[in-house]
Every structure is written in structure tokens, then in C-alpha cells.
Amino acid sequence: MFDSLMDVRGMRHILLIDEAGSVVTSAGISPGALKAELGLVAASRAVIGSLQGNLEAATWQELLLDVDGGPVLLTPYGTQILLTAFDDVSSLGRVRFAIRRLLGSS
């Protein structure tokens, strides 16, 4: 299902990470980049949890990180997190549209 995101122009890789930090599915990622991305998701979960607590927010929508390797968008999917890494921030609208279309149809 998530493999179709790799057809979006500019997409580098995707990961779906469960609550325990394990990879549920992935596409386009090299084994060398996997460890760094899992660390990024773990740190982001802590930031998201802190922000939710401070803002008294029950849910969150997205978190965009512009890191050295390029932008990464984290999107909640139930209790899991969908990580999409893409080429440039200018591709954000296209990436968000593809994610919303995919998640809306699931």
C-alpha cells in the first residue's frame, strides 16, 4: 500500500514505524540510512509527546523536519508513524497530497 508513495516525484524513501520503534514496512531506504531514520523517529516521538502534554493536545497532524539529508515528514497513522523523506521542501505540497490521498483511501 505505502509503496505507491515512491511514485511521487522527489520521494527518497518511506518507513512505517510501530509503537515499539520497529519497521512495519519500508521502501527506497538503504540499510545504512535505516538506523539514522529510526533514531529520528524515536527523538521525534519524544518531542511530539512533550508538545502534546504542554499544549494539552490529544492528537497531532504532522511534523516536518528539515535535516541535513533533506526534509522528512512524519505523519501519524493510528499508533504508527509514517516517515516520508523527500528531495526538497518545495515538494511538500505534492508529498502531503499523496499521503492524504493514500491514508484517506485506507
Image (cartoon, rainbow, N blue to C red):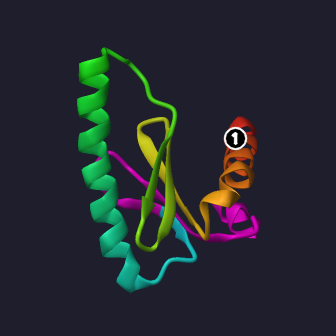
Residue 49 visible in the displayed image: yes
Q: Looking at the image, which is closer to me, 72 or 102?
A: 72
Query: In the picture shown, does residue 103 fall above or below 32?
Result: above
Q: Amino acid at mark 1?
A: Arg
Circle 1 is placed at which residue position? Answer: 100
Rendered position, 45 above or below 67: above
Place of residue 82 in the rendered image (x, y in percent of width and height, measured from the top left): 50, 51
Left or right of 3 on screen, residue 16: left
In the rendered view of the protein, which quadrant contains the C terminus?
top right
- Residue lying at 38% horizontally and 18% vertically, measured from the top left: 58
Q: Position of residue 42 (x, y in %)?
A: 27, 53
Q: Which image quarter holds the N terminus?
A: bottom right
Q: Is residue 18 found left or right of 45 in the rendered image?
A: right
Dividing the picture into quadrants, the one containing residue 100 is top right
Report the residue at 34% width, 55% height from top: 41
Residue 19 falls within the magenta-colored stretch: yes
88, above or below 92, in the image? below
**Residue 91's x, y, as percent?**
69, 59
Residue range (magenta): 1-24
Q: Residue at x 27, y 63 (%)?
A: 39
